[in-house]
Amino acid sequence: MLKLLNLLKDGRFHSGEALGAALGVSRSAVWKQLQHLESELNLTIHKVRGRGYQLAVPLNLLESHAIAAFSQGAQWPVFIHEEIDSTNAEGLRLAGKGQAAPFLVLAERQSAGRGRRGREWVSPFAENLYYSLVLRIDGGMRQLEGLSLVVGLAVMRTLQAFGLADVGLKWPNDVLAGGRKITGILLELVGDPADVCHVVLGIGINVNMQSSDQIDQQWTSMRSETGRVVDRNQLVALLSQQLQHELARHRRYGFAAFQEEWEQAHLWQGRKVSLVAGTTRIDGVALGVDGQGGLRLEVDGVEKSFSGGELSLRLRNDS
Ligand code: BTN
């Protein structure tokens, strides 16, 4: 199917005969594959007698040579999938099979994209970015401290470089644009954090998606914010460059070096918030983050720190 998509991605008309010849199949087999593309990938294909077939919207597919063309300096090895259950899951599998880290897993779509707190990450074909960077950590819990917050900062800087103005962070690692979610970050770990482990930095960015009836929270995309279609290969290159820079700084100086910068980017700094974990709720005022990336809350006049993957922050009605 990818071969057929690559032939059609320019958004021009292609005759059934030419497509069949290029794929080495009959015209009726081309027809079947086209129907499959439409139903499986939710793509619209115009069929015009005498002219052939045309994708309603040209496609910008992920390609390693295109990423390389946008990249400056060293790049991580990249595995690109047309479809995968989850790029995070694939990253963990590859690490388990001995693939040397760092490496990158990308996909055009995910059939079981993982979000925080057991939620699904909506992952339509070729519209967004599903990006998992796998790192090896050798015996240093400190290298994990605040790591997901550093990833949030790197994503925020990348979005700013693409011209998004009103972007900021929400503890622990949501990136918001115009107050709506544009990126989700999910870190997953395998191995022994006190010895050798692999961590997957999973990043989902809403890029060119303009509608979805599956998302149950306020969301936006880069295209909706800027009015421009974003080249996802360029986005991969810039995000990787930004991550390389911030991860090196984090390795060297730890999260404490990011604390102030992170608090400046925190959209709910000084606001009245509720910290929710299951049915438990703690009300307080968001003071910032501690040296390990935990949330500092003022609760009944006392400063307390909180951390944990199951926690989520909400703005209080009276904030
Ligand atoms: C969140 O719920 O906010 C986190 C969402 C993380 C989604 C990304 S998409 C790439 C990577 N692969 C996954 O299965 N999840 C992460």
Image (cartoon, rainbow, N blue to C red):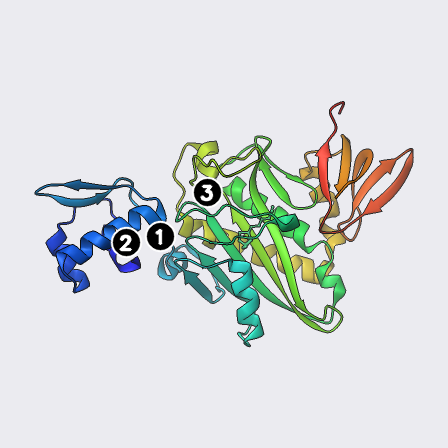
| Residue at 57% across, 71% down | 95
Three-letter residue code for mark 1: Leu
Disc with the residue nearer the chain's start (2 vs 1)? 2
Could you say where residue 5 lies in the image, as x and y percent from the top left? 28, 53
Disc with the residue nearer the chain's start (3 vs 1)? 1
Q: Nearer the viewer, mark 3 or mark 2?
A: 2
Circle 3 residue: 207
Camera sees residue 288: yes
Q: Residue furthest left?
A: 50
Q: Is residue 270 left or right of residue 236?
A: right
Cα–Cα gap, marks 3 and 1: 13 Å
Q: Is residue 98 left or right of residue 273?
A: left
Q: Are marks 3 and 1 in contact (CB under 8 Å)?
A: no
Circle 1 residue: 61
Three-letter residue code for mark 3: Val
| Residue at 49% across, 61% down | 105
Three-letter residue code for mark 2: Leu
Cα–Cα gap, marks 3 and 2: 20 Å
Could you say where residue 151 lies in the image, as x and y percent from the top left? 62, 52
Ligand 1 near label 1 (Cβ, under 8 Å)? no
Relative vertical location of residue 87 with respect to residue 8 in this rendering, above or below:
below
Could you say where residue 67 lies in the image, as x and y percent from the top left? 40, 57
Ligand 1 near label 2 (Cβ, under 8 Å)? no
Disc with the residue nearer the chain's start (3 vs 2)? 2
Q: SS of the residue at dot 3?
A: loop
Circle 2 residue: 5
Image quadrant where one finds the N terminus? bottom left
Cα–Cα gap, marks 2 and 1: 9 Å
Q: Across the whole image, how many numbered discs are drawn on residues?
A: 3
